[in-house]
Amino acid sequence: MCGLVAGCATTRVRPAVARASVSSVPRAATIAAPTQPAVTTPAPPPSPFADLPGWSDDTMAEVLPAWRRTCDRLARAPSDRPVGRARPLGTVADWRATCDALPSADADHASVRRYFEERFTPSLVTFEGGSTGLFTGYYEPELRGARRRHGRFTVPLYERPRDLADGHRIVRGRRRRYWTRAQIAAGALRRTARPIVWVDDAVDAFFLEIQGSGRVVLEDGTTIQLNYSASNGHPYVALGRVLIDRGAIERSAVSLQSIRAWLLAHPREAQSVMNNNPSYVFFRESNDGGSHGAEGVVLTPGRSMAVDPQFVALGVPLYLDVAALEGVGPIRRLVVAQDTGGAIRGAIRGDLFWGPGPDAYDRAGRMRQSGRYWMLVPRSVAQRAAP
């Protein structure tokens, strides 16, 4: 959900309209009756999607589960609720209308592509004259744990504390900033929060917080799903930056993998280094089979993305054009904005969810690419916004 190192203007794509041309066949001198003029049928305007690199090659049906979950959420929202903060994107009713014609679950790529082309207009997201930004990735980690503390299971993963209120706690009638990571590691939550589970590795627990959700395999082989519940309200500090400043890792070598390797290789220093990030995440246990995003829906691997909600409304489809990632190639695909993250800040900033497993861990850890995206808005909204 968060990176390891570290208003929105849009330009609507407007197709050029080919004007109709009419040509007449001249009347021959020997023919008394005039001929009918021949009319050439005007060529249809080019699709505004034609300029999107790789649009026709995307395996488009893969985005349908993510978009269907957003449509299910829209169905429960008030119809007159505005969509978007920095830029008005109509109301829930405008977006819900696009869901009425949602393709079936077994629709092929061409059908899903046609659905989006007929109901949406792409708009390149720009900010202060630029259209490129940073794109990273995150994944769903898997930890080993137990319901009670014993043996090697000594690291607690806490539920939301009872005294946490908007990043503060009340002490003798006065609001105080909530405990930092260092204070929590020293035992500050013993009386106010219940551990959901105990895991066997403090570094893995730290990265679970960064990702925002994950799964824990218990001793009997059963798995529990943990999703983000709240944070202690302190700002997120990227550990990659801390290790660069210490001279521990070269800037060019920073990745999820290199940071984790350094922490595991320096167990005596690991906790004090992690304490440089005062932000701390609390979890809730769920049983609906997946990691949840800030939109409140289960995330879809490769098709859900975390964004800055100050600039991009949750639930909006986005088409990515991101530089090639080794082993993956250029990332040109339709995704849905369904999550946020402590380090995901800015108009052109994305964090792509890769899902669970070793491949997801590898891709998320290495992804730090430049790219751009187009926002897809309902045609009715785009037409009202047109000058």
Image (cartoon, rainbow, N blue to C red):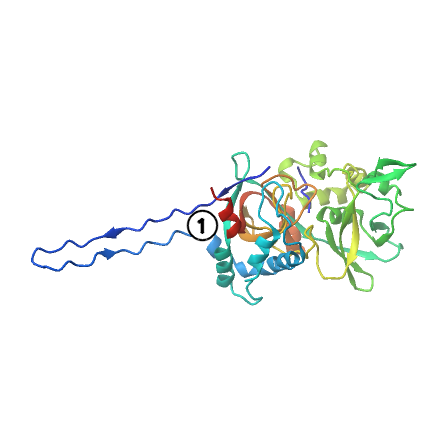
Q: Is residue 209 left or right of residue 121?
A: right
Mark 1 residue type: Pro
**Mark 1 secondary-structure assignment:** helix
Residue at the outermost left position: 30
Looking at the image, is 178 positioned above or below residue 354? above
Depth check: 287 or 16 in front? 16
Q: Which residue is mark 1?
A: 48
Q: Is residue 321 left or right of residue 288?
A: left
Indicate the position of residue 376 as horizontal and vertical percent values.
53, 50
Q: How many numbered discs, if any?
A: 1
Near-viewer residue (267 or 54): 54
Q: Is residue 38 above or below residue 15?
A: below
Viewer-side residue, 268 vs 133: 133
Residue 162 makes an appearance in the image: yes
Q: Is residue 365 left or right of residue 282?
A: left
Horizontal and vertical percent position of residue 165: 82, 43
Give the farthest residue toward the front: 33
Other-residue count near label 1 (Cα within 10 Å), few / some / many at <14 / 14–19 / ≥20: some
Residue 320 at least partly seen: no
Q: Nearer the viewer, residue 12 or 365?
A: 12
Relative image position of residue 167 (x, y in whole percent): 80, 40
Q: Position of residue 347 (x, y in %)?
A: 59, 40
User: Is 107 positioned to the left or the right of 76 in the image?
Assistant: left
Q: Residue at x 78, y 43 (%)?
A: 280
**To which quarter of the image does residue 196 belong?**
bottom right
Instruction: Please give the name of the residue rendered at 69% of the width and 34% of the height, measured from the top-left corner.
Output: 244
